[in-house]
Image (tube, rainbow, N blue to C red):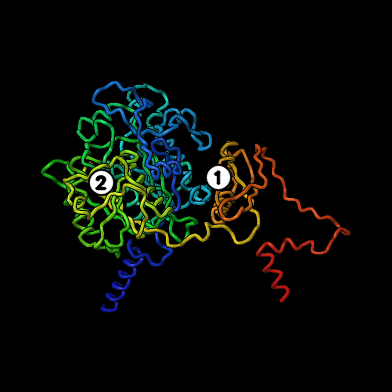
Amino acid sequence: MPGFKNNVNSITKNKCKKFSCIHPDTDGDDVVIAGMAGKFPNCHNVAEYEYKLYNKIDMIDDDERRWPHFHAELPKRLGKIYDIEKFDATFFGVHFKQSHSMDPQIRMLLEVAYEAIIDAGVNPKSLRGTKTGVYIGCILSESEKAWIYEKDTSDGFGLTGCNRAMAANRISYSLGLEGPSFALDTACSSSLYALDNAFSAFCNGEIDAAIIGASNLCLHPYVTLQFARLGVLASDGYCRPFDKNASGYTRSEAISCLFLQRKRDAKRIYANVVYSKTNCDGHKAEGITYPSGKMQEKLLREFYQEVDVLPANLGFMEAHCTGTKVGDPEECRAIDNVLCSQRSTPLLVGSVKSNAGHSEATAGICSLVKVCLAFETGQIAPNINYTEMRSEIPALAEGRLIVVKEKMNLEKPYIGVNSFGFGGANAHALLKAFDKIKINHGVPNDDLPRLITWAGRTEESVKVVLDSIEGKPLDAEFISLLHNIQNDDVTGLVFRGYGIFAKDGNTSAKCLARQVDHYSGIKRPIVWVFSGMGSQWTEMGSSLMTIPQFRESIERCQK
């Protein structure tokens, strides 16, 4: 009997070790963010989002793309994304009748999820049949009224087009993914809850990869009117986290996805996901929407007791702060009590909502993308709409928290991210910078030109990729990612092109030749042409010695 108990104890210990979220078995078991993509207010992609963040460009405007300024209680300023009317239904295998009755959120999530996988250097076709999970945060479908409640249709496509479960299930269906697939709604913390669910699934061995994402579109004015009457929106449309003039948040749209893998499988790493944890406020005498600083503090305290990272090692805290009267002071008090109390230096803090508004379900993903950009650039993007600190936040007044107002260097490798739902669902995640430093911008030591091939749905899409190589350092690692994406044929990519690029010093690449054509479907064999006898000359093969592998082979033969 004692031997049996010892075996049970041994198995239990090994099992706990195997499925430990904080201490994976090996370095290769770490969960990493390998790819990211998205559409943000007045930004077509992550690159434009990065540019506007770091150049302090306000992404919110007052144009009337969604609805006219017809109601005095509706703020005129709103964060809006582009191209919600566009969708390549044929490429994703969606019937045209279904595509016309689909919530634009679901259409765009499908596109953005595909782009995130591509960004990771992975061909989406290679994921078919794999245990890849899909976790999507989605609160409201502001278009379902038009497709379900106001039209008597004979096909029922409105139901399958607007059901929020389809936000995740449609991605799994179109890409052939066989891991868990579901939508989450914890209000404004939905996307960080998506991260938490994916992280736990990795730890439990349920999945090998994951797509996490979220969507938020503002399509019906009465939803915004409800938020305004709830008292959470700034009437002037300016979101001012930490600022004395803060009066609420600005509603905003965003659709974004991240692709997560284990470190050993990843070809690109933006950040390590160190840990994730959630809790709920429970009952509060003030009401369900009142934020509980006490429970936020409890979450942070338990989090940093469980993880082997000291608060002193945090380089930045991306706060949830939305500019509401109650929310910002409660959150900052929790951060101050748990983190600042264990530091000898001030903690840098910021909130992307000052730049891009509050995208509600997508807020956490917007923050995670901002954090990944900080790791990539080594600099923290600044807040805007911040002129003077709020007196109700002692940690700011006394210098324990410092709001990032200009670009600042990231001095420590860890960044914490807060996200809170208005029903009391709280989440916190800790990310770490990838410790591998790219040498010389990835420029190779040899002088060999590089061949890049690319296939796309349109001629323009191929040209965009080839154009992106010029004017930047010839990054051999990035080119390797492009090669990996194109290593398998994808049906429907009817334009094919190539470019030959050489390094021009260490600062840019120059194009030696390029061509883009419509693909006819005819496969052409590779042909080797030899000049025959009698045309040899001295040192005719010397140029081959510039190829490192060829040189190594010849040198081995010489020995």
Q: Residue at x 17, y 51 (%)?
A: 394
Q: Is residue 444 above or below residue 216?
A: below
Point out residue 70 in the picture as x, y percentages from the top left corner. Answer: 29, 20
Nearest the camera: 236 or 137? 236
Left or right: 236 with respect to 152? left
Residue 47 seen from this side: yes
Q: Which residue is mark 1?
A: 468
Q: Residue at x 46, y 62 (%)?
A: 436
Point out residue 310 in the picture as x, y percentages from the top left corner. Answer: 28, 64
> Mark 2: which amino acid?
Phe
Q: Residue at x 43, y 53 (%)?
A: 376
Q: Quadrant of the C terminus?
A: bottom right
Q: Residue furthest bottom?
A: 2
Q: How many marks?
A: 2
> Mark 1: which amino acid?
Ser
Left or right: 374 with respect to 283? right
Q: Quadrant of the N terminus?
A: bottom left
Q: Residue at x 23, y 58 (%)?
A: 339
Disc 1 to disc 2, C-alpha distance: 37 Å
Whether label 1 touches label 2, CB < 8 Å: no
Circle 2 SS class: strand
- The disc placed on residue 420 is 2
Circle 1 SS class: helix
Task: Please report whichever mark, 1 or 2, sits nearer to the chain's N-terminal start.
Answer: 2
Crowding at mark 2 (Cα within 10 Å: few <14, some 14-19, many 20+):
many
- The disc placed on residue 165 is none
